[in-house]
Image (cartoon, rainbow, N blue to C red):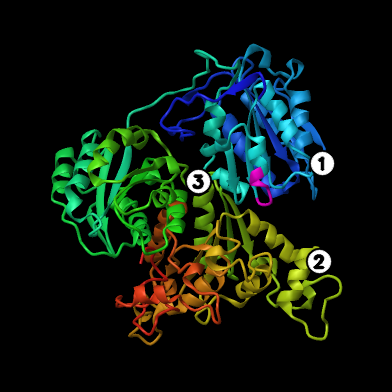
Amino acid sequence: MGTNQLLLYALLGIMAFGLFPKLEAQDALAVGKRDIIFLVDSSMGTIIINAVREFIRKFIDTMPIGPDQVQVGVAMFSTTPRSEINLNSFSSKESLISALAKIKPNPSVEVNIGSGLDFVRTNMLRAESGSRIQDQVPQLVLLLTSKKSKDAVQQPAEALRQMGVLTLAAGSRAADEAELRQIAFDESVVFMQKDFRMLLRNPREIISPLSTLSGVVVSEDPTDPVVDVTTVRTQRVVRDIVFLVDGSSYVGSKTQTVLDFITGVVNRLDVRPERVRIGLMQFAEGQRTEFYLNTYNTKQDVLSAIARLSLMGGRALNTGAALQYALANHFQPAAGSRRRQGIQQVLVLITGGPSQDEVKQVADRVALAGVLTFAVGAGQVEESFLKTTAFVESLAYYRSNFADLSSVVEEIMTPLITVVGESDTPDSKTVLIVYAHQSAGSFNAAAKDAAVDVLKKQGCNVIVSDLYEMKFKATATKEDITGPVKNPEHFCYGEETMLAWQEGRLASDIVEEHKKLKEADIVIFQFPMYWFSVPAIMKGWMDRVLTLGFAYTLEKRYSEGIFREKKAMLSFTTGSHETMFNSSEIIGDMNVTLWPVQNGVLNYCGFQVLAPQIFWAPTHLSAEARGSLLEGWRTRLQGLFSEVPLTFPPVDSFGEGKGFQLKPEVQEKQADSPFGLTVGHHLEKPLPPHSQMKAGV
């Protein structure tokens, strides 16, 4: 950087770019003065721009905005840049958020990031535009882009560094990570996202450095440089903590060191029902609960139970299944979890060996549910595995020997009681209800109305597609395409509609449903079961709206599907009682009935499939009993966004050869199980009980 160098940032907190404790609005943080400019790629499209706008709004909402505090500006760019909000345009949080709502996308196939950086430097980081750079107030720029730049970025980025500007870079989709590393002042402030909508799930990953970094320009060989310091006000510790202990022979004779570690942590916590609750489970090939969050009310009782822990033994480790089990069984209200009250949920994994099952996808699911996973390991477990499993890499702690776990106790305590994850809560979520019943006086209508009422009261945006009211066309035909088809003599609906979707020639009713589906975070299908499936009009919705290319491709399906960040569920009524839907009754196993839709449609498109809501034979029940069913549905809806999805084998369980067969190692692992892998992959064994009706089995 020539004669000047940029002094790297100062952070006060629990970890580099740590997550703030959960704080309420602007009065929760004491943040030093700073000028922050968001440089946004305007070519990203309406949905992504809306997500970015919401991310910026959330940031503004947590900051003390004002001319003597934090100032925020926004610039947009595609091929040419423009200023949307200067640093001194608005002095209040309300006016700033109001102006933010007016920014719009500008479609473009190319972007010039270099010119955008130059524009910020020459037009916005000036005193007349509100910049306080001459007063030594930290200057930060956050670039958000989904494309690689057409023009050069190195020189504009270097010019900002020479000024002492801290540039952070976030990219998604076609953004070039290497290019973003050139732009950012340090590699640790480069953030890659599959989709910027993920920012809304965990905004603190970027919000934290934006509000804590402080840079100054100093001469070479600085002595005692002055840096801005950010302070965070902490409050009393209230959280639910579950210890997940490796009970295999990888720990074995080292059991006491593990127990000493857990005891050391618990001894430093205020354990009681209204403050910190503790749960304990262990795992090897299977899982076993030792005690739940609500089993013991005093620290002494918890410590006594920990001391009695006897390990399961065995060489096999299924860490992914253990994480799933913890989420489905321990972080639930019945087990003492207070997640619905907004209490932070924490999982502390302690392990000594490699897992034999898929872990990353399950760990991501745990994180999206708002559970903070700390990963502590020693012995034969790899540090990289711990970092993959932890909520963020900084919450992974590795020691080569179990005897050294005692040194982790002090290191882990501060983040354990202060770090907060972004919960998957209903606020600002969009729910699409695809509804199929002819009568407004039906039980299905009542179930639909209950969902609308409960979800709206939680702050959700609820969209209803009333298929009969819409007179939705149920047949998949050439009329779904405007203009000529590619092969009129041998019409192939999938190929023709994919081409029409790509070229913008689909029928207007399909396009409208596409818009709803793209906005939705969760889709609820509400219907009466017809002939052991969905009504024809709803099947037509699936046939026509889940268009090839839009909803799935050969490369993007199942666990790698296009809708893998969305959830879906079936909510339906039956004509017969529950007792008739089992393997020994005339109708047969409901799990088999559900498999074609839940696996063959929803899971195929990548949806995280929630357990179905089944209203058994409401026409045969009293009014009071029907009311009880609806009340149970309302209760479930309160925690719907925190529910664990059903389990389906990931794509990488199958080989890419003929037939995409289960890999030999997967079949070998299943060999000792008394049940098949799934309803469809039963391996000539009894079906796994309730696997299409309950999560975590």
Residue denoted by label 1: 79
Residue at the location (37% across, 35% down)? 415
Magenta residues, start to end: 173-178
Q: Which mark is residue 505?
A: 2
Estimate the spatial distance between the alpha carbons at disc 1 and disc 2, rounded to whole Å.
Answer: 28 Å
Residue 175 on the magenta segment: yes
Q: Is residue 210 found left or right of 22 in the rendered image? A: right
N-terminal of the pair, mark 2 or mark 3, is 3
Residue 445 coordinates in the image, percent (x, y): 54, 64
Q: Amino acid at mark 1?
A: Thr
N-terminal of the pair, mark 1 or mark 3, is 1
Q: Main secondary structure of the magenta part?
A: loop
Residue 527 on the magenta segment: no
Badge 2 crowding class, 10 Å Cα cut-off, few under 14, some 14 to 19, many 20 or more, is some
Badge 1 crowding class, 10 Å Cα cut-off, few under 14, some 14 to 19, many 20 or more, is many
Q: Amino acid at mark 2?
A: Arg
Q: Is residue 662 visible?
A: yes
Q: Amino acid at mark 3?
A: Gln
Q: Is residue 53 visible?
A: no
Whether label 1 touches label 2, CB < 8 Å: no
Q: Nearer the viewer, mark 1 or mark 3?
A: 1
Badge 3 crowding class, 10 Å Cα cut-off, few under 14, some 14 to 19, many 20 or more, is some
Residue 128 coordinates in the image, percent (x, y): 76, 16
Quarter occupied by residue 310: bottom left
Residue denoted by label 3: 458
In the image, 77 versus 326, the foreground residue is 77
Residue 635 coordinates in the image, percent (x, y): 40, 54
| For residue 76, above or below residue 513 | above
